Image (cartoon, rainbow, N blue to C red):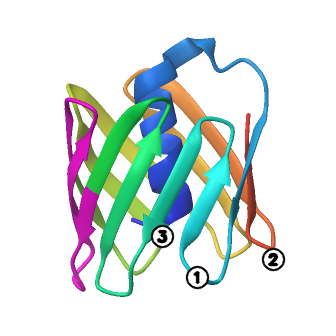
Amino acid sequence: MNLKTLVFVGLVVLFGSSMAQAQTYYTDSYGNTTGPGVSLYSDPYGNTTGRVGGRNLNTYGDPYGNTTGRVGSQRLNTYSDSYGNTTGTIGGNRLNLYTDPYGNTTGTIGRRRVNCYTDSYGNTTCN
């Protein structure tokens, strides 16, 4: 699962339907992601750590597309294939997302619709 998708997954789980406004996040070339309520670091070995909405996020992504970890007390288990599909669970919610080659991520997490766009500068906006 790419970091932008992971950030949004964490926010949906933590804030749910209260995310009525579009939110923008930025990821730099060093693996740092920042934005409203988000401060994360991803190392070259697949580990992502930090805080999302006041809760700790700790995940590990292996070279085969599997990501495991926690967002606060919520367990995260996902698989991302080479076609842009990400499936799995976070907490008790089913996750089905698709990221196209143009930076759009759409799908569902539980009953919530996901609609995000990442531009070529590393900015991700989610509605």
**Magenta residues, dominant SS class:** strand
Amino acid type assigned to the residue bearing label 2 in the image: Ser
Amino acid type assigned to the residue bearing label 1 in the image: Tyr
Amino acid type assigned to the residue bearing label 3 in the image: Gly
For the residue pair 98 and 62, the one nearer the viewer reads as 62
Q: Which residue is mark 2?
A: 120
Q: Which residue is mark 1?
A: 30
Q: Is residue 110 above or below residue 44?
A: above
SS at circle 3: loop
Mark nearest the camera among 3 and 2 is 2
SS at circle 2: loop
* Residue 72 in picture, x, y percent from top left: 28, 33
Query: Nearer the N terminus, badge 1 or badge 2?
Result: 1
Viewer can see residue 98: no
Mark nearest the camera among 1 and 2 is 1
Mark nearest the camera among 1 and 3 is 1
Which numbered disc covers residue 118? none
Q: Residue at x 78, y 23 (%)?
A: 21
* Residue 26 in picture, x, y percent from top left: 72, 60
Q: CA distance from mark 1 to mark 3?
A: 23 Å
Q: Residue at x 68, y 75 (%)?
A: 28
Q: Which residue is mark 3?
A: 84
- Disc 3 vs disc 2: Cβ atoms closer than 8 Å? no
